[in-house]
């Protein structure tokens, strides 16, 4: 069952939901800055999801920005669910994007948060029933399959952030002699060789060179780096100034290769179809509860949860925001599940309980 227009948790309608979309994978720093400026301009009432592959503004109503892509209604909500579930990521099912989506929604107006909560709930359900085994380090496997390089010899990773470490770990598993380069040596013992970034050129030659530097690194000409049989640019923005071609692969190249092989996209398509089924169920549930006493109770409880989550984040900034969100949401859902199931059987009692919460029941149109 496809639900294209429902009135959930008060107006506006989901048919007015939209996303303005910029795809930013493997852009240069200049292109990335231009895309970000476009995404941020004129979207004060939107949730801005900014990640290494995309910049997206989710909100309600028409928009006159210069986004190259725009989706509306259920398509826009499905897009948000797919992004949150990691189905649109180069690494299928990556888990970091869920936290980025939640952070964007937390900073958005209430009506956008409510719409986004439906998409995120659907994404979370899909992740609970699906086993995702890949991580960013497995991009190395995909790049090697596109090249003629065997997984042996020397490999240099530029960058010691989360992605750089995952690539280094995977390279070691595959049999490479791994060296990592960074501006500062990470605390603790590293299972690989370490050199300071400015000294990396002294290595002169490596078999594989991998760029995993952060957004502030700028672009580096390959002639200033060790000569490599294969260079992999996994940076966002791009780390290497040269255009892709023989001997140089980017994330965009990996995505293009996957798109050209039907069997490689089959699992993504199956998961997107399943996510669509879950999303439609969530929309139907929201349509039933949105204008009811139970919907009013949940809205009141969600307002309390958000305030408490914000207080916890201020008191304990060391706890990742997505962890605080997941824990408080899980607690609220468990507390409300059994009472709301019973209240559905007694609408009059449900309205009285809503009054105890100080919750406003929205009349159906």
Image: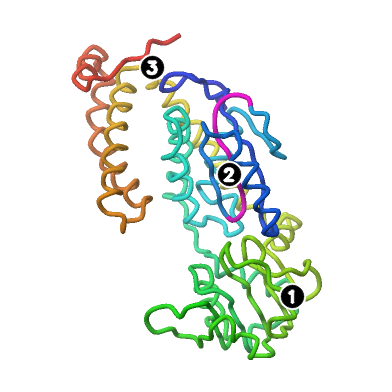
- Tell me the residue that label 3 is attached to: 291
Q: Nearer the viewer, mark 2 or mark 3?
A: 3
Q: Alpha carbon of mark 2 to alpha carbon of mark 3: how far?
A: 29 Å
Q: Residue at x 41, y 22 (%)?
A: 9
Residue nearest the viewer, comparing 162 with 314: 314
Q: Position of residue 304 (x, y in %)?
A: 27, 33
Q: Residue at x 71, y 36 (%)?
A: 66
Q: Alpha carbon of mark 1 to alpha carbon of mark 3: how far?
A: 57 Å
- Label 2: how many residues lie within 10 Å, few (<14), some (14-19) or many (20+)? many
Q: Position of residue 352 (x, y in %)?
A: 20, 15
Q: Residue 147 carries which label?
A: 1
- Tell me the residue that label 2 is attached to: 272
Res 17 → quadrant: top right
Res 247 → quadrant: bottom right
Number of numbered discs: 3
Mark toward the start of the polypeptide (2 vs 1): 1
Q: Are marks 2 and 1 in contact (CB under 8 Å)?
A: no
Residue nearest the viewer, comparing 119 with 128: 119
- Label 1: how many residues lie within 10 Å, few (<14), some (14-19) or many (20+)? some
- Image quadrant where one finds the N terminus: top right
Which element carries disc 1, helix, strand or loop?
loop
Residue nearest the viewer, comparing 122 with 186: 186
Colour pattern = rainbow
User: Is residue 12 placed above or below 144 in the rendered structure?
Assistant: above
Q: Position of residue 288 (x, y in %)?
A: 40, 20
The residue sitting at the right extreme is: 246
Identify the magenta region. 52-62
Which element carries disc 2, helix, strand or loop?
helix
Mark toward the start of the polypeptide (1 vs 3): 1
Side of 351 relative to 242 (left or right): left
- Label 3: how many residues lie within 10 Å, few (<14), some (14-19) or many (20+)? many
């Amino acid at each position: 069952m496809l639900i294209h227009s429902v009135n959930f948790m008060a107006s506006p309608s989901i048919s007015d939901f939209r996303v303005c979309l910029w795809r930013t994978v493997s852009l240069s720093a200049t292109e990335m800055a231009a895309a970000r400026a476009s995404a941020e301009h004129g979207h004060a009432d939107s949730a801005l999801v900014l990640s290494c592959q995309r910049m997206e503004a989710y909100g309600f109503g028409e928009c006159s920005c210069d986004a190259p892509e725009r989706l509306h209604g259920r398509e826009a909500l499905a897009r948000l669910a797919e992004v949150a579930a990691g189905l649109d990521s180069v690494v299928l099912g990556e888990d970091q994007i869920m936290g980025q989506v939640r952070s964007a929604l937390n900073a958005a107006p209430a009506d956008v948060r409510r719409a986004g909560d439906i998409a995120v709930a659907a994404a979370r359900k899909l992740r609970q029933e699906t086993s995702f085994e890949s991580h960013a380090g497995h991009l190395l496997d995909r790049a090697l399959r596109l090249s003629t390089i065997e997984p042996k010899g020397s490999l240099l990773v530029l960058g010691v952030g989360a992605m750089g470490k995952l690539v280094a770990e995977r390279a070691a598993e595959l049999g490479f002699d791994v060296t990592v380069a960074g501006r500062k040596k990470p605390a603790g013992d590293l299972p690989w060789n370490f050199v300071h970034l400015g000294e990396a050129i002294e290595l002169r030659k490596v078999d594989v060179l991998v760029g995993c530097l952060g957004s502030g690194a700028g672009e580096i000409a390959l002639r200033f780096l060790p000569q490599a049989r294969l260079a992999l640019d996994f940076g966002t923005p791009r780390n290497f100034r040269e255009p892709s071609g023989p001997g140089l692969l980017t994330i965009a190249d990996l995505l293009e290769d996957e798109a050209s092989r039907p069997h490689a996209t089959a699992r993504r398509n199956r998961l997107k179809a399943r996510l669509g089924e879950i999303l439609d169920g969530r929309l139907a549930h929201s349509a039933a509860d949105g204008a009811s006493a139970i919907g009013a109770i949940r809205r009141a409880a969600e307002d309390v949860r958000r305030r408490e989550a914000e207080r916890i984040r201020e008191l304990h900034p060391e706890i990742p925001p997505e962890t605080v969100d997941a824990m408080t949401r899980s607690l609220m859902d468990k507390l409300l599940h059994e009472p709301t199931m019973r209240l559905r059987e007694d609408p009059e009692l449900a309205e009285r309980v809503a009054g105890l919460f100080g919750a406003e029941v929205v009349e159906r149109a």
